[in-house]
Image (spheres, rainbow, N blue to C red):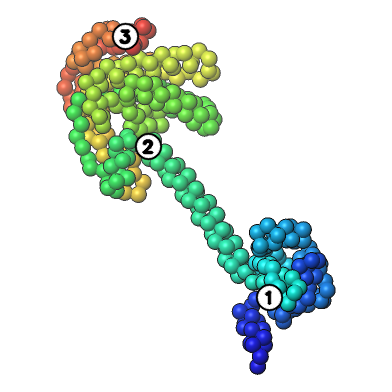
Amino acid sequence: MSIEAINEQLLRAIGVGVALLDLSDLKFRFFNDTFKEWFSEIELGQQLGDVFPDIDAAGVRRALDEAGQFTGEASFRVRRRTMTIAMTVNPALDGKERVAVLVCQNISRIKELESMIDSYSMMVERNTREIKREKEQVEKLLLNMMPRSVYEEYKTFGVVTPRTYDHVAVLCLDFADFSGTVARQDPGVIVSELNDIYTAFDRIGDQFGCERIKTVGDLYITVAGMPDPSERSVQSISDAAVRFIRYLEQRNRSHPIDWNCRIGLASGSVIGSVVGVQKYIYDVFGPAVADAMRLREHAGLMEIVASEDFAARFGDDHPTVSAGEGRTADGKSVRLVRLLADTDAVGR
């Protein structure tokens, strides 16, 4: 077997198509069996552009003259399948005649793998975006259920350690004749109204450093002085209470449904923790919460009631009037005061 025959078999074995082109007009002078197998209708004397219509013959000559080599890729159909080849054209000498050697390597599998990698990368990127979006939604939901510091502890350790917080001010609010209002109105209207009101309460609370703990129907509880202690917790919760009343009074003047609240304020120690295993919530309970709920029962429509001891801690920030006597959650008798919300004292 001659060297030429051996070279031909080697080229076939590695799937390389080889052809010789006349350098002057880029016509085919020779091609091996692999090249013939790919392009079954090819004939000697055909030009490069006849076999590769997408290849610019002038660009090939220019590349050979300037760079001494042309490289490119081409795709074509072979038995219902798209094949992609990488081609290189190099000038050579055949005796005294100048020819160009065209070498074509089948890179279809490489292109398929690249396409698979691109598709996989796009899928991973899309899934990553979806996971990030879902994570942000979960984080937003959890931050609506618990203070950020508690959420950070839960995210880091998977549990929240119950803690006792001292000197916490608690606001407990509900609406008069809530059951009657619910019975008279469409459920969608009630939910929409409460969403608007509670959103406004949350915004007001944020202005004064209050943290809404929970809502249960018409019961709204917010606190100041936890999880971060504050020397102004009583002032902050009182300011928020006055603003709640003012907001409702202004809202009632322009809405068909009147919402008349009752507010109780108290201060003391509370316990804060995540309660539940599967359907968990962040909750606070303790003497201050119980007292605020009890004092709320002594409030009339659109009134804020607290103990005299509580009122003494915010000084002249809000004027008060006596509201008689009442009892705390543990049955202790206390003197009560009613905060006046129709002044400009807030924010002084």
Identified by mark 1, the residue type is Gly
User: Is residue 3 or residue 302 the one in the foreground?
Assistant: 3
- Which residue in the rendered view is the most extreme toward the bottom? 1
221 over 312 or under it: above or below: below
Percent position of residue 116, x then y: 57, 63
Neighbourhood count class around disc 3 (C-alpha, 10 Å): few under 14, some 14–19, many 20 upward: few
- Which residue in the rendered view is the most extreme toward the front? 96
User: Label 1: which residue?
Assistant: 17
- Which residue in the rendered view is the most extreme toward the left? 332
CA gap, disc 2 to disc 3? 31 Å
User: Label 3: which residue?
Assistant: 348
* Side of 93 relative to 168 (left or right): right
Q: Is residue 320 visible?
A: no
Q: Nearer the viewer, mark 3 or mark 1?
A: 1
- Circle nearer the N terminus (1, 2): 1
- Circle nearer the N terminus (3, 1): 1
Which quarter of the image is occupied by the N terminus? bottom right
Identified by mark 2, the residue type is Leu
Percent position of residue 179, x then y: 43, 28
Identified by mark 3, the residue type is Arg
- At 53% across and 32% down in the image, what residue appears? 188
User: Is residue 51 or residue 292 the one in the foreground?
Assistant: 51
141 over 287 or under it: above or below: below
Mark drawn on residue 143: 2
Which quarter of the image is occupied by the C terminus? top left
User: Is residue 265 or residue 141 the one in the foreground?
Assistant: 141
Secondary element at tag 2: helix
CA gap, disc 3 to disc 1? 89 Å
Q: Nearer the viewer, mark 1 or mark 2?
A: 1
